[in-house]
Image (cartoon, rainbow, N blue to C red):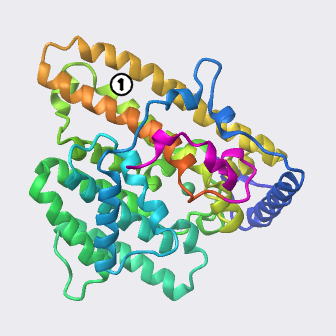
Amino acid sequence: MLRIVEGVVVAGEYTSVLEQNVAAMHVQYEALLGEGCGWSLRSLFSTPDCDIADYCRDFAPNRFGLQACERVEQFCRVHGIWLEAGGAHYNSMTPYLHPGAVSAERMLIIGVYNAILFWLNDTVGREKFAHLSAAEQQQAADAVRRLSRVLETRCAPADPLPVETATVELLSMLSQRADPHWLAEFAASTIEHLQPAIRDQNARARGHLLSVADYIDLRAFVSGMYPAIALCEFGSDTYLAWDRITAAGLAGDLHTLRVLTAQIGALMNDVFSFEKECIVDRADFNLIPVWLLNNPGSTLAEAVEAAAAIVRDRLTRFRRIHARMTGRTAQLTDTDLARAVAVHLEDLLGCVQATWVWQITTLRYKGVSIFVESRLDERASVPESYSMR
Ligand SMILES: [Mg+2]
C-alpha cells in the first residue's frame, strides 16, 4: 500500500510500488505497439472548434533559419560542443521557436544559446543523469554550478570548460546588443532553468512523487521555455516595459499568456518525447507517467489521453486570452506600448505554433511509435511550407 502524508508518497515504501507501476506501463506500451494501436497527435491536441493543424497552417520558420543553423553548427564545432548524434535535429528548433527574429545575427545568437542548452540536455540532462556514474553526476553538478557563475559574472574561470568558453562568448554577443536590464533577468532565468534541468528528476531520485500540478509548475522551469520566451524580446529587439503594461491593466493577462506558452511548450513536448524519454531512457519525469502514477489503477492509454487533455485545455485558454489581449492592445492610446505588446503577442503565438510544427517536422522524435505523426514514414505528410529555407 502507498502511504501518503500531505500529498507526498513516502519514499522506500513507495519505491517498489512505483517500480511495479512503471514496469506495468512498459508492458502496456509494448502491447499497444504490438497490436498496432495508437493515437493521432493531431486528434489528441484538437478541440471541436480548433484543429491544431489548421491553427498552425500559416506558420513558417524564420527566414534566416538555414543560414543561422549553419553558423550555429560552425560555432559549436569551434568550441567542441557539437553533438554528431542529434545536433542537426535539435539545432533546427531555433528558427521554429523564433520565427519573428529580425536579423540573421540575432537568429545566430539565439541558436548558439539553444545549442548550449541542448548540448547540456543531451549529455547530462535529466533523462541522461540517472545513467551517469557517481563521478560523472558530480561533474555534471559542478558544471551547472560553474556555468551559473559564468552567467552571473559573465567571465570565464581560469580553467574554462569548452561550454564555459562558448557561454562567455554568447554573453559578450548578447551584451553588445541587448537591453541591459533584460539581459540581467535573462541570465537569472537561465540559472533558474539549469538548476532543476541538470539533475535526476525521476521519482526514485527525488524520493517522492510530484502531484500533477506541482509537476506542471516544475516542468515549465525545466523545459527552458521561460528563457526562450524572453529571447523573443531579444529576437524582435522590442523589450516589454512591465510598469507601463501594468498601468495599462494588461500585466495579469500577459503574464498568464507567457505561463501558458511555457506550459504548452513543455507539456506538448512531453507527449512527443514520451517514447524517447520514458521508454528508451526509462525516465518518469514526464506528464504521462506522472499522471499515471498519480492515478493508481489507471492504464497507459488513459494516461496518454489525460495528458493530451491537459495540453488541449491550455491551448484553449491560450487562444481565448490571446484574442482578448489582441483586442485590448489595439485600443491602447500609447502607440509605442501597443506596438511592443502586439509584437510580443505575435511572438507568443509563434512559440505555440512552433511547438506543434517543429515537433512534427524534426527527426528528433521519429521512430517506432504509438503516435501516428511520430512514425518515420509520416514525414511525407508535413506541409512543404514548414521546411526551413
Ligand atoms: Mg522532452
Between 73 and 240, which is closer to the camera in this rendering?
Answer: 73
Give residue 49's position: percent from left, percent from top.
60, 17
Q: Is residue 359 left or right of residue 333?
A: right
Q: Is residue 156 left or right of residue 279?
A: left
Magenta-tinted stretch: 367-389
Q: Quadrant of residue 159?
A: bottom left
Is residue 178 positioned above or below 42 on the image? below
Is residue 156 positioned above or below 339 on the image? below
What residue lies at 58% left-to-right and 36% top-to-bottom? 311
Give residue 168's position: percent from left, percent from top.
20, 71
| Mark 1 Cα-neighbour bin, 10 Å: few <14, some 14–19, many ≥20 | some
Q: Amino acid at mark 1?
A: Asp
Report whether residue 215 is seen.
Answer: no
For the N terminus, the image quarter is: bottom right
Is residue 110 positioned above or below 334 on the image? below
Is residue 320 positioned above or below 68 on the image? above
Give residue 135's position: percent from left, percent from top.
50, 88
Q: Quadrant of residue 80?
A: bottom left
Q: Is residue 372 magenta?
A: yes
**SS at circle 1:** helix
What residue lies at 65% left-to-right and 55% top-to-bottom? 274
What residue lies at 24% left-to-right and 77% top-to-bottom? 165
Give residue 51's position: percent from left, percent from top.
60, 26
Q: Is residue 6 left or right of residue 80?
A: right
Between 111 and 194, which is closer to the camera in this rendering?
Answer: 111
Ligand 1 rendered quadrant: bottom right
Q: Which residue is mark 1?
A: 253
